[in-house]
Amino acid sequence: MGECEGRVALVTGASRGIGRGIARRLAAEGASVVLSASRLGAHGALVGTLEATVEEIQRAGGRAAAVAADLSSDRERSDLVARAEACFGPLDVLVNNAAMARFAMPSASTLGDRRKMLEVNLHAPIDLAQQVLPGMRTRGRGWILNLTSDSARQPAVPYRDSPAAAHLITAYGATKAALDRYTEGLAHEVAGEGIFVSALAPVAIVLTQEAARVAGHIAKNHPDMAEPMEVMVEAAVELVTGQHVGRIVHSRQLLHELARPVRSLDGERVIGDAFLPADLDAVLV
């Protein structure tokens, strides 16, 4: 029996990176997983890694389906939970992983970019939580996990990397700071109803292939600022199975606090602990 046996989960931004890893692991733990992303091909067909991940989960014996939605559009996301629940039934778990980043110096961040980031990084998680909560309240059980970022806080001086790297992410970090505040408030509102809401951030960089291409130089120069995907995913599993109320927590901190081992994405093997190092060369292969 896996930790999520018999549960239904929706993971947004699941076509790649962290969302894809979380979806794979939840399926390995027994959940029926609905993956969501905005990627569509000709005639509205799902394409690319979203479809590939569904097939990968199914080949491994798991249950998975895909539902497309552009989370920057309030119209497209307005019925996402209902469409997800049409696949496997009522949702027990919502993972708000999807995010949008537009990097610019604080003095140059455009209104258009800020609006797009707020739609995806703040308004979409709020809307989806509000869609899923009535059913969770009726059943007296549920988990909502929001993926956040250490960029919600201004880094300490002297900066670990360049001043530009610290400042370019300011507007994105502001959207995550707002999400953190919402997470805490919602968590305390619904905790007495058996619904557990938290937010999870990496220490700095989760070393996916996409992150390695963008910030590989930081990971190479400061290995302690990067963590393998399995660490982030393990912490996510803990937060969508345990009774955590309003935690705004870093992955390594949580795993170390609980002495929880880190398992492979298929759940089959223990591969380390909270301090499992990231292997940049392996990710870039």
Image: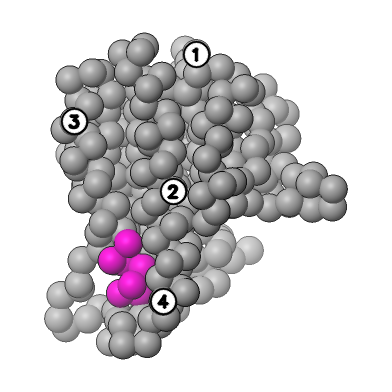
Do the residues under discs 3 and 1 have CB atoms within 8 angstroms? no
For mark 2, what is the residue? 124
Q: Amino acid at mark 2?
A: Ala
Report how many numbered discs are placed on residues in the image: 4
Q: What residue is shown at x 22% (from left), y 27% (from top)?
A: 190
Viewer-closest of 128 and 52: 128
- Of callouts 4 and 1, the N-terminal one: 1
Between the C-alphas of marks 3 and 1, the distance is: 26 Å
Q: CA distance from mark 4 to mark 1?
A: 44 Å
- Say which amino acid is labelled 1: Gly
How many residues crowd mark 2 within 10 Å: few (<14), some (14–19), many (20+)? many
Left or right: residue 80 versus residue 127 is right
Q: In screen coordinates, is 19 left or right of 255?
A: right
Marker disc for residue 189: 3
- Identify the mark nearer the N-term, 2 or 4: 4
Amino acid type at mark 4 = Leu
- The spot of residue 220 in percent (x, y) is 42, 74
Nearer the observer: mark 1 or 2; the answer is 2
Question: Could you tell me if the residues under marks 4 and 1 are in contact, i.e. CB atoms within 8 Å?
Answer: no
Residue type at the position of mark 3 = Glu
Q: Magenta stretch: give its range.
A: 169-175
**Residue that badge 1 annotates:** 6
Determine the CA span between mark 1 and mark 2: 26 Å
